[in-house]
Structures are given as C-alpha cells and as structure tokens.
Amino acid sequence: MPRAASLCVFCRCCLLAGLITEASKAQAPLTLRDALDLAEKNNPALAAAAAVVSASEAGITTARAYPNPFASSQTGRQMVRVPGNVTGVVQILSFQQPLELGSLRPSRIALAEQSREVAELQRQVRRIAVLSQVRRTFYEVLRRDAELALLQENLALVESLRKRVAVQVEVGEAARLELVRADAEIASARAQVNAARIRRVSALAAFRAAVGAPLEGEISLSGEPEPVAILPALDKISADALQDHPILRLARSERIRAQSRISFEKSLRLPQPTLRTDYERYPDVPNFRFGIDIPIPLWNRREGPIAEAQAAFREAAANEELRRIELMAALEGAYRRLEEAEEQIRAYERGVLPQAEAALKAAQTAFQLGERGILEVLDAQRLLRSARVELLNARFDRQAALVDLDEFRGVDPTGIYRK
C-alpha cells in the first residue's frame, strides 16, 4: 500500500476512534455526585452569592479607610486702591483634614464586618438550597425513568396477551369481544407510556435548570434511592438544627447587623470636626491661619435614621423568630413524611404487591385453562401495575422526604457522597 494511502487510513481510524470516544463520553450516565459537582462549579446562583461575599469584603476595606484631606489653591492679583498697598500676584493655599472622633469609625467597621458575615451565611443558605434542589430533581428524573420502564413493561405484557387472544379468536376458542377488550387495554397502556414520557421530559428540564450547567444532548442519569439510615429522634434533630442551621444563624446575624446599624447611626450624631490650614501670600505680607470647623447639630439630630435603624432591628428580631417557627414546622413535616413513606413501603412490599402478583398468576392460569375470560386477566394486570407504581412512588416519596429533611437539618449535600 502506498505511504499516502496508509497515512490516510491511519487518520481515518484516529478520527473514528475520537468520535467513538466523544460519543461514549456524551452518553455516559450522570451520577448524583457528578451533578452536584457541576452545580457547585457552574450554577449562576452560587456565583452570584460568592460575588456578594466579595462585595462585602470590599465593604470592610471601605469602612477601614480614613477620610481623604482636601486641598485647594487660588491665584489672583492685588490692585492698588488704597495708598500704601503693593500691586502684585496673590496666592491662597488651603488644606483640610476631616477627623473621626468617638465611636464613629469602630461602629462603621463593626457594621461592615457584620454585613460580611451575613453575606457568607446567605451564600451557605443558597448553596444548600441549590444543591438540595439538584438532589430533588435528580431523583425525580430517576422516578420518571423507573415509571416509564414499568409502564413499558406493562405494555409489552398486554401486547403479548393480545397476541394469544388473537390466536384463540382465529381458532374459535374465544369471542371477538375478547380481542376488542385487549385492543382497548393496549390503547390505554400506550397512552400511559406517552404520559410518562411527557412527565420525564418535564423532570429532566427541571433537573437541567437546577444544575445550571450546560448539559448538551440527551442525558441519562444513574443512581438508586438512598437507603435511610437510623435517624436520631426528632427532638435531637430539632435541637441540632436550632443550634447550627445556616438559616437560623443567618437570622441571628441579620439581627446583630441591625443592632450594629443602630450604634452606627447614633455615633453619627457626634459632630465630626475638620482641621483647616490656610496660607495666603500677598505681594507685601504673607498670612498663615490655622483653625477647626465643627458642624452644629441644631436642626438635624438624626432622629429619623436612628428610628429607622431601631425599626429594622425589631423587624430582624421578628424574622428570626418566624424563621425558627417555619424551620421547626418544615423539619417535623419532613420527618413525619419519611416515617409515613416507610410504613407505606412496608405495606406494599409485604402485602399488596405479593397479593397482586398472586392474583395475576391465578387469573392467567384460569385464562389458559379456559375457566376465565380476558377481562379477569386485564383487571389483575391493572391491579399489579397500580401496586408497582404505588410502591415506586412510595420509595421516591421517601427519598424526597429524606432530601427535605437533610436540607432542613442543614446537611451539606456534597458531604454525603464524599465519605
């Protein structure tokens, strides 16, 4: 083979291998850990929260800065109007330095530092909310995948049953009405499959939005509902959440910031002086002056800003109590939903599902022996399908309750999968 032809074949093989590799990467299932990593790196909400933290850090630098001095220069000319004066150029130089006395500077710095703590806690709260939403939508897609697979399996079983009925109708062992019933059941099963596909599309769209990262093409997810470990008692979980949850720490920090603002507004009532130095150079005699400017709080004693800061403090204290009540109610609700889902799963696994499977098996046997018609088989099939769907929903309801419980407990979602 000529060298050019060999090189061409080699290039084609390399290109084909690259395309296969890229295709395999594009089709690789996405795990929950991958989704959480993508969200943490690319989600715009987390980037915005980090920018707010950076801005608050810059605010501390601004609060620590000293006021700049003022300098001015004027130039003119003195004309002779009075006997004895000298004609010539006049120069006036002025320098002013504002001072910060009392608690003005410390209170301003304390307010800026408290604002930075508030911004950091807001970032933590948003991070937990974003990553919890990623978990929630991830498992919702898995729920819709499993539901679609279950309904497709049900459709295949109904179609298989329809084929047997068609054979029986052809040989005269069954009435044509049996075939009509089977066709109607197939149409219903196909409609359910199509509805499940639509629900999966909606769940996948919500997952893409929660991740906030570019996910090109058709994606598939890989995972199973998490096993529920033995949880502490509700009282213990509530006490830990009251102590450490970022939402309540944020509320406390906002209250402290509001209190710091009151101190800052009160410190502004103290008149802040300005040192002044003037130098005037006349053609005959130079002048030098030194003085101080003090504003007099005669008309404005900052009653309005102080009252606004005090009202903001009362609002922050009320919001802290409101968030505590809401968090405790949401925590208890998630805990009870988790318990109820566990009870429902046990009921379906130990009772409803085995009975539905036994009923279908008995109906199929009776149908094969000619003792029952297709209607009994279809009823048993629908009962089994309903039991499987309900069990599936119960498992993912338990998962949704677990995600909510972790969020209300303030658990870091990424820490669960990196142990």
Image: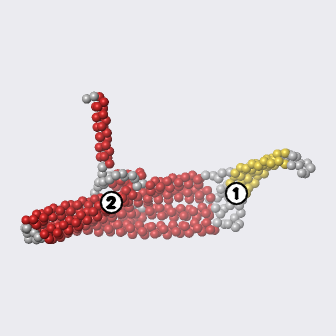
Q: Position of residue 111 (x, y in %)?
A: 56, 59
Would you say 227 lies left or right of 263 here? Answer: left
**Three-letter code, disc 1:** Pro
Residue designated by label 2:
201
Q: CA distance from mark 2 to mark 1?
A: 67 Å
**Three-letter code, disc 2:** Val
Label number found at residue 273: 1
Q: Position of residue 132 (x, y in %)?
A: 38, 59
The residue positioned 10% from the left and 66% from the top of the image is 169
Q: Nearer the viewer, residue 285 or 212?
A: 212
Label 1 SS: loop
Label 2 SS: helix
Q: Nearer the viewer, residue 292 or 216?
A: 216
Query: Going by the picture, which residue comes out furthest to the top?
Result: 2
Q: Position of residue 36 (x, y in %)?
A: 37, 54
The residue positioned 35% from the left and 53% from the top of the image is 35
The residue positioned 41% from the left and 51% from the top of the image is 41
